[in-house]
Amino acid sequence: MEQTFIMIKPDGVKRNLIGDIVSRFEHKGFRLIDAKLLNVSRETAELHYCDLREKPFFGELVAFIISGPVFAMVWEGEHAVKNARALIGATNPVEASAGTIRGDYALDVSSNIIHGSDSLENADREIGLFFKGQAAFSY
Ligand code: RTP
């Protein structure tokens, strides 16, 4: 059974979308393993997005992630990484299908509501970064 790391970004928290997004993951069949509301430090944001540090938008992305609280979660299920990415939709909301989270709630790539791990390796790394190791709950 896979686990994936999901984070509602500051725009999603400010727009009161936590309940709807959690509900979508529950209805899909995922199990919630851990969750918390937190302010991300600059150091953690830079580590989280370390693969993108050469991109021209890296500074803007880090500034955005630390601009307000995020809601970090660990969800478990079959093919959790790919199934979660399907619920989330394409990175650029212009390309995200209606019915996906980004397709329904976002207009612009720089404020796209939610992050989901893009591989099992990154899921493990991100869970470790935000939850200091494997999330605790299992049921
Ligand atoms: P995420 O990591 O947030 O789940 O997004 P992703 O895998 O779908 O996309 P990725 O390529 O990893 O990009 C991470 C985040 O960077 C922002 N971005 N801005 N201004 C731009 O052209 C641009 N491109 C990407 C997005 O917020 C994206 O989610």
Image: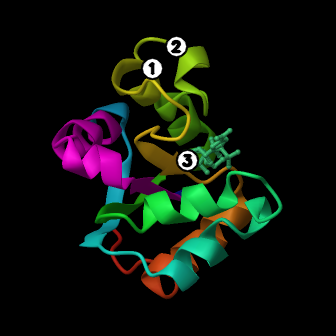
Q: Bounds of the magenta span?
A: 4-26
Separation of residues labelled 2 and 3 (CA atoms): 19 Å
Circle 1 residue: 103
Q: Quadrant of the C terminus?
A: bottom left
Quarter of the picture containing the N terminus is bottom right
Circle nearer the N terminus (2, 3) = 3
Q: CA distance from mark 1 to mark 3?
A: 20 Å
Q: Look at 69% across and 64% down and name the residue there.
A: 122
Q: Which quadrant would residue 58 be assigned to in this image? A: bottom right
The residue shown at (22%, 40%) is 17
Relative placement, left or right, of 106 versus 126 is left
Q: In the rendering, which numbered label is found on residue 80?
A: 3
Q: Majority secondary structure of the magenta segment?
A: helix
* Residue that label 2 marks: 97
Please report contact status of discs 2 and 1: CB closer than 8 Å, yes or no. yes
Name the front one of labels 2 and 3: 2
User: Is 71 rendered above or below residue 30?
Assistant: below
Mark 2 CB near ligand 1 (8 Å cut): no
Is residue 19 left or right of 2 when viewed as pictured?
A: left
Is residue 125 covered in magenta? no
Q: Earlier along the polypeptide chain: callout 1 or callout 3?
A: 3
Residue behind label 3 places its C-beta within 8 angstroms of ligand 1: no
In front: 13, or 111? 111
